[in-house]
C-alpha cells in the first residue's frame, strides 16, 4: 500500500502565484517523521524540511511554508510568490520509527512560467 | 565538505554486463543507503547499511549486491544487468538511521541497460 500519496502529478503556475502541494500519508506508528525534498532539473535531491509526528506547528522558511495536520494525515507545502527557480519535482516522504527507509511519494512536478 | 558523491554520473551497459556504483560521503555518517528512482514511483530503497561492515536489504534488493568495507564508502553492484535496472540511482547517508536524522543525497547516477 502506498504510504505517501501526492495526488498532484503536475502543477503549472505563472511567476508570483502561490502554489500548494498536497501530501497525504498513511502510518500506524505514533512516532514518525515527514520530509519534503526538492529535485531541480539538475537532478540532485535537496532536503527542505523534516517534521516529527509530535510537532504539529506550522513552519515558515522564507517563501516556503508547511502545514502539518495529523487529523487529516496531511503535510502540505506552499510556495508563496513563486519564482522560475522553484521549478522542480517536489517529493514528500515518510520515515517510521524502527524503519530505516524513507517512503517517498511519486512527486509533484512544479513548473513556474515567467 | 563534498557531502555525498557518486561515481560515475552516467553509464550505459549491455544486458548481462556487470558494474559497480561507488558512493562516498565525508560527513562521518554511520548510515548509508542506495535508492533507485523510476518515473512516477518516487524513490525506492534497494539496500542500506547501518555501519561499516554491515548491509541489509531494502524494498527492491533483487539483482543488486552491496558492500560497506569502509565507513565512508558504500558500493552497489549489478552482477548481470537487465533492462529493468535502467534507472537513476541515488546514494544517501545519515547520522542516525532510525528516522531521527535527515538523509542527505548524492547527485545520482543515470544508468541505461540496453
Image (cartoon, rainbow, N blue to C red):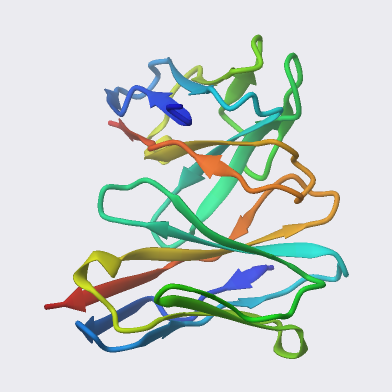
Q: Residue at x 19, y 82 (%)?
A: A15
Of residue A80 and residue A38, the one placed in the foreground of this image is A80
The answer to whether A111 appears left or right of B46 in the picture is left
Find the residue positioned furthest to the top.
B69
Residue for point 73% across, 74% down: A26
Q: Nearer the viewer, residue B86 or A91?
A: A91
Residue positioned most to the front: A62
- Looking at the rendered image, the quarter that the C terminus of chain B falls into is top left
Q: Position of residue A57 (x, y in %)?
A: 70, 80
Across the whole image, how many numbered discs are drawn on residues? 0
Residue B7 at x, y = what percent? Answer: 38, 21
Q: Is residue A101 visible?
A: yes
- Is residue B82 found left or right of B91 in the rendered image? left
- Asked whether, in this view, residue A6 is left or right of residue B16, the answer is right
The answer to whether residue B11 is above or below residue B44 is above
Residue A69 drawn at (x, y percent): 70, 86
Residue B96 location, x and y as percent? Answer: 75, 39
Indicate whether B16 appears above or below A47. above
Is residue A87 among what the camera can see?
Answer: no
Picture quadrant of residue A111: bottom left
- Picture layout, residue A55 above or below residue A46: below
Question: B105 or B14: nearer the eye?
Answer: B105
Image side of residue B16 versus residue B52, left or right? left
Amino acid at each position: 500500500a502506498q504510504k505517501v500519496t501526492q495526488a498532484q502529478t503536475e502543477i503549472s503556475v505563472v511567476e508570483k502565484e502561490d502554489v500548494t502541494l498536497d501530501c497525504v500519508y498513511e502510518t500506524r506508528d505514533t512516532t514518525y517523521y515527514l520530509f519534503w525534498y526538492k529535485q531541480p532539473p539538475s537532478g540532485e535531491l535537496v532536503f527542505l524540511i523534516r517534521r516529527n509526528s509530535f510537532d504539529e506547528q506550522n513552519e515558515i522558511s522564507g517563501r516556503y511554508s508547511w502545514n502539518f495536520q495529523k487529523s487529516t494525515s496531511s503535510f502540505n507545502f506552499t510556495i508563496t510568490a513563486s519564482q522560475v527557480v522553484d521549478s522542480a519535482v517536489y517529493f514528500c516522504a515518510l520515515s517510521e520509527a524502527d524503519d530505516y527507509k524513507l517512503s517517498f511519494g511519486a512527486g509533484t512536478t512544479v513548473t513556474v512560467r515567467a | 565538505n563534498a557531502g555525498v558523491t557518486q561515481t560515475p554520473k552516467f553509464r550505459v551497459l549491455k544486458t548481462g554486463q556487470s558494474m559497480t556504483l561507488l558512493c562516498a560521503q565525508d560527513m562521518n555518517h554511520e548510515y548509508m543507503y542506495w535508492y533507485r528512482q523510476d518515473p512516477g514511483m518516487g524513490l525506492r530503497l534497494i539496500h542500506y547499511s547501518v555501519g561499516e561492515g554491515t548491509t541489509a536489504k531494502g524494498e527492491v534488493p533483487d539483482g543488486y549486491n552491496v558492500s560497506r568495507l569502509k565507513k565512508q564508502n558504500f558500493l552497489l553492484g549489478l552482477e548481470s544487468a537487465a533492462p529493468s535496472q535502467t534507472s537513476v540511482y541515488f546514494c544517501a547517508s545519515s547520522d542516525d538511521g532510525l528516522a531521527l536524522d535527515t538523509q542527505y543525497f548524492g547527485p545520482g547516477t543515470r544508468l541505461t541497460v540496453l
